[in-house]
Image (spheres, rainbow, N blue to C red):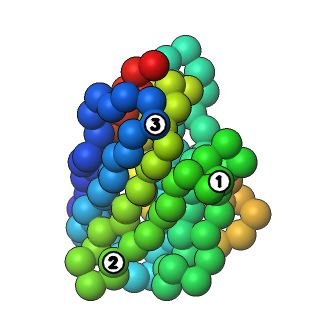
Amino acid sequence: QVQLAESGGGLVQAGGSLRLSCAASGLTFSSYTMGWFRQAPGKEREFVAAISWNGGRTDYTNSVKGRFTISRDNAKNVVYLQMNSLKPEDTAVYYCTGRTGYGASVYRDTAYDYWGQGTKVTVSS
C-alpha cells in the first residue's frame, strides 16, 4: 500500500531553519505531484507548497514565498521542504501528500489521494 512518511520536524527558534523530508513507497513516485500542507492548532489545514512530477513546476502559498523551497529526488522517492526564516506563525503539523496531475486544484486538500501522518514544527519567539 501507499505510504508517505514525514520526518525532520522539531522545535526551532524564530529565524531558524528546518528541512522536512517525506519518503514515499507503494506508488510510482515520479508520476505524482507532491505537496505539503499544514494545520495549526485550532485552524483548518492549509496548502503550503506543491511540486510537479519532474520538478518543473512549483507553487507556494503567499506567506511562505521566498522562505520555503519544495524539491524532490525521484531516484530516492523523497520530497523535501526547506524552511528558512521561520516565524512563530509557521508552527503547525506539516503533512506530505500526493496526487496525479497538476492544475488549479493543487491548492485544495481534497484533490490529493494520499497523506502522511504529519510531523510537528514548533517555532518559538
Estimate the x, y position of residue 109 in percent, counting from the top left: 59, 47
Closer to the chain start, of discs 1 and 3, is 3
Residue at figure coordinates x 33%, y 81% from the top left: 74
- Quadrant hosting residue 114: bottom left
Question: Distance from label 1 to label 2 (Cα)?
Answer: 21 Å
Residue 113 makes an appearance in the image: no
Residue type for callout 2: Asp
Task: Give the left or right position of residue 74, taking residue 91 as reference.
Answer: left
| Residue 65, disc | 1
Closer to the chain start, of discs 1 and 2, is 1
Point out the image quarter for the C terminus: top left
Residue at figure coordinates x 55%, y 26% from the top left: 89
Point out the image quarter for the N terminus: bottom left
Front label number (3 vs 2): 3
**Pointer 3: what residue?**
15
- Quadrant hosting residue 121: top left
Task: Give the left or right position of residue 28, taking residue 87 as reference.
Answer: left
Residue type for callout 3: Gly
Report helix, strand or loop for mark 3.
Answer: loop
Residue at figure coordinates x 37%, y 62% from the top left: 80
Which is nearer the eye, 15 or 115? 15
Estimate the x, y position of residue 71 in percent, counting from the top left: 44, 70
**Pointer 2: what residue?**
73
Residue at figure coordinates x 46%, y 48% from the top left: 84
Question: Distance from label 3 to label 2 (Cα)?
Answer: 26 Å
